[in-house]
Image (cartoon, coloured by chain):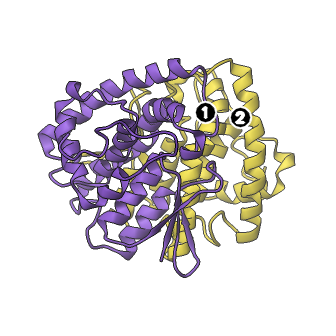
Chain colours: A purple, B yellow
Amino acid sequence: MRRLIHVFMSPACRVARLALGEKGIPYSLSAADDAQAHLPVLAEDDGTAITGLWAIVDHLEGMYPDNPTLPHDPLERAEALRLFEWLMTQFHEAVTRRIVFEKAAPAHTGAGDRRGPSMDSVRKGRNTLAEAFDTLGALAEERGYLACREATLADFAFAAHVSALDYFGEIPWADFPQINDWYARMKSRPSFRPLLADRLPGQPPVTHYAELDF
Amino acid sequence: MRRLIHVFMSPACRVARLALGEKGIPYSLSAADDAQAHLPVLAEDDGTAITGLWAIVDHLEGMYPDNPTLPHDPLERAEALRLFEWLMTQFHEAVTRRIVFEKAAPAHTGAGDRRGPSMDSVRKGRNTLAEAFDTLGALAEERGYLACREATLADFAFAAHVSALDYFGEIPWADFPQINDWYARMKSRPSFRPLLADRLPGQPPVTHYAELDF
């Protein structure tokens, strides 16, 4: 069976798991030996390895076009990719790295180094999180999902970040009812179940982490 | 005519210019009002806007499949995307941001904030540059171009970074003959000409910047 080499709290690794799940492709998980490697890596049955989220997404879309993770309409597709890129780069650097990568053990994040004092980093991340959640919440309310009426790669990317942040209780849900509604729908997808079963040794999730109706 | 909204020293903006050039698509350049916006933006003739490098590349490949920037072979394609992602995220953060974004005026880079003391940042960037150039030089020598025998998005991404670094004289060419050879071939492509004509007000390039046989 094909294997996904990953670390648990890397958003890129979580997006790859969601994309495999959305396409109904069976796979097993392997913990990365070197958390600082370029992850995730999809090791195919024939011995070839596809490295990095973009290569994996492109590979899955090319080989398994059923249940596409990108819309067919060119403008919706461009919008999904705009948000996907922004979430995996800007949002990742400004929010998830600053919070999750400070809280989780480095072996589970792929973090190379920690930047500056921990609580200062977390505080900055929380401020940026609030701004971004307002913006993304408005999109979800207006469109149904982030880029259009259907869930796309943009939603899987955001859900990957949200799930990692929520694992550590870092989302003030009462402040973001639109994101709460959107995330409840994302969590109920079958592709999400494996992520909700994640448990880091010595770092259990907050109690509501796996609740579908929270 | 379609317009590319950009800043001169952002590698992502430079890749978009190369991709448009490779496909022979005419466009005009507009300087971004807000260098911190999500750039580049491709403003199409019909008023639609495609935002971010990934969306633009996907859009151009979908609408203008001639002169593809990604290989047809699935494994070469995955390798090109692996390197592309790595260059636009890891290499960007560890090298280009640390050097070019310290040296160029922020209006030309899209840099939000500068991290820590300038010379310390530049020094770290130079060390990482040397390691990365050794690795990428070996790939170029073995394969011809970075991912395979033809230039792909991986090469355009690396050439975008190299050209921004070279503008400021930050590449010790004598140390990297393999990259020198590869870059001479990249610079001779017609798509590269507009980049070699770049001149920042008050910050002229080093004298060899636009020389094709350097």
Same chain shared by disc 2 and disc 1: yes
Q: Residue furthest right?
A: B174
- Vertical placement of residue B54 versus B145, above or below: above
Dot label at residue B97: 1
Compare residues B164 and B122 and report the one nearer the observer.
Answer: B122
Circle 2 chain: B
Q: Is residue B143 left or right of residue A213?
A: right
The CA span between labels 2 and 1 is 8 Å
Q: Indicate the chain on which mark 1 is placed.
A: B
Q: Position of residue B11 (x, y in %)?
A: 55, 42
Q: Is residue A31 above or below residue A3?
A: above
Quarter occupied by the C terminus of chain A:
top left
Q: Residue at x 68, y 17 (%)?
A: B117
- The label number, if any, that marks residue A179 in the structure image: none
SS assignment at label 2? helix
Name the residue carrying label 2.
Answer: B125
The crowding category of the residue bearing disc 1, from other C-alpha atoms within 10 Å (few below 14, some 14 to 19, many at least 20), is many
Q: Which callout, 2 or 1, points at the residue further toward the start of the chain?
A: 1
Horizontal and vertical percent for residue A70?
Answer: 29, 60
Instruction: Specify few, some or many for label 2: CA neighbours under 10 Å numbering under 14, 14-19, or 20 or more.
Output: many
